[in-house]
Image (cartoon, helix red, strand yellow):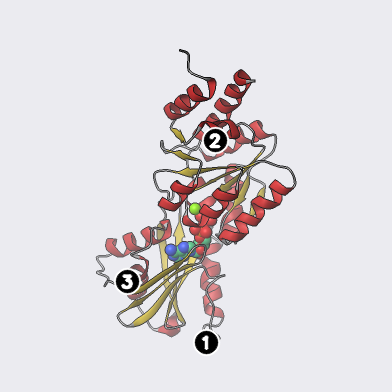
Amino acid sequence: ATMPPLLSAIANAGRHGVLIKSAVVMERLGQIDRVALDKTGTLTEGAPQVTDVRPLPAAGLSEDEVLRLAAAAEHPSEHPLARAITDAARDRGLAFPSVADFASTPGTGVSATVDGRLVEVGSPERLPTSPSDGCPVADLVEQSESQGRTAVVVRVDGTTVGVLGIADRVRPDAAATVSALTSLTGTTPILVTGDNPRAAHRLAGEVGITDVRADLLPQDKVAAIKELETAGHRVLVVGDGVNDAPALAAAHTGIAMGRAGSDLALETADAVIVRDELTTVPAAIALSRRARRLVT
Ligand code: ADP
Ligand code: MG
């Protein structure tokens, strides 16, 4: 027997490096007319590196001590930024203790008890600042963000002790993917990210995206998708993180990045990119459209 068009499209997509979870998903992919792309781990390689460690002079900790505490708190996290921080500590030969009370808040950061002290690492916009922190923190954050980096603050027992600057490489096929998606849907994709607006706009400019939504919590990503769907659009979300899972679930179709993606994103998504290339996304959409023409 000849294979039904949707099934051969699934086989084809598999050869291109996208695992489509069902024939229904294969069909829905061809209906999408808007694409929302996550930043960290999706448009970027998700292998970010710590580029600068800036201790807050008033707190009196060394660069190594700031990094060591941050790495200890991040160690249980699977976020790409957490990997960057623990790798940087290991590169400097720093041993970090195991922690208690680890907690992570998607789109915000982590907290844990390290050597009896509460250590928090995360977004400068989201972590509460204490009056004692003052301007130096904002200045240090600004120094990193103005270079297109992601700044995260490190706090110990409620006081900021330092700022880490973290940089990630744009995927080599990001611009080509954005341009292919623009032709397929007749409009540019949207960047939806929890990162700061400066880093978001810089990356958007590099890959050809004009619609940028930054500083989003997981539920804000969902709201952005729902707004488009309410306006009659069918939205494809591509993401990798725990913070993307609600948006992947809310979207008409959700695709997760397989290699660096979180387990939750992989389970929630309708399809998974198993070859680590973004161009597989427009390829899968084109395959779906072709299969649909054969079905109808
Ligand atoms: P994106 O949407 O670009 O993938 P996320 O929503 O995962 O980004 O993260 C948004 C922001 O939240 C990060 O830029 C960082 O400031 C903060 N953040 C999230 N997780 C962590 C973590 N494990 N350690 C430090 N900061 C974090
Ligand atoms: Mg991400």
The CA span between labels 3 and 2 is 45 Å
* Quadrant for the C terminus in the image: top right
Determine which quarter of the picture holds residue 138.
bottom right
Q: Nearer the viewer, residue 143 or 43?
A: 43
Which percent across, then down, holds residue 39? 53, 51
Q: Residues within 10 Å of mark 2 (few under 14, many from 20)?
A: some
The answer to whether mark 3 and mark 2 are in CB contact below 8 A is: no
Q: How many marks?
A: 3
Which percent across, then down, holds residue 121? 44, 71
Give the residue pinned by disc 3: 68
The CA span between labels 2 and 1 is 52 Å
The CA span between labels 1 and 3 is 23 Å
Question: Which residue is painted at 34% across and 64% down in the image?
Answer: 76
- Lower sequence index among marks 1 and 3: 3
Q: What secondary structure is found at the residue carrying circle 1?
A: loop
Question: Label for residue 132?
Answer: 1
Give the residue pinned by disc 2: 25
Camera sees residue 194? yes
- Lower sequence index among marks 3 and 2: 2
Q: Residues within 10 Å of mark 3 (few under 14, many from 20)?
A: many
In the current view of this chain or complex, which residue is farthest to the right? 231
Question: Which residue is painted at 61% across and 31% down in the image?
Answer: 30
Label 1 is placed on what type of residue? Ser
Q: Nearer the viewer, residue 232 or 138?
A: 232
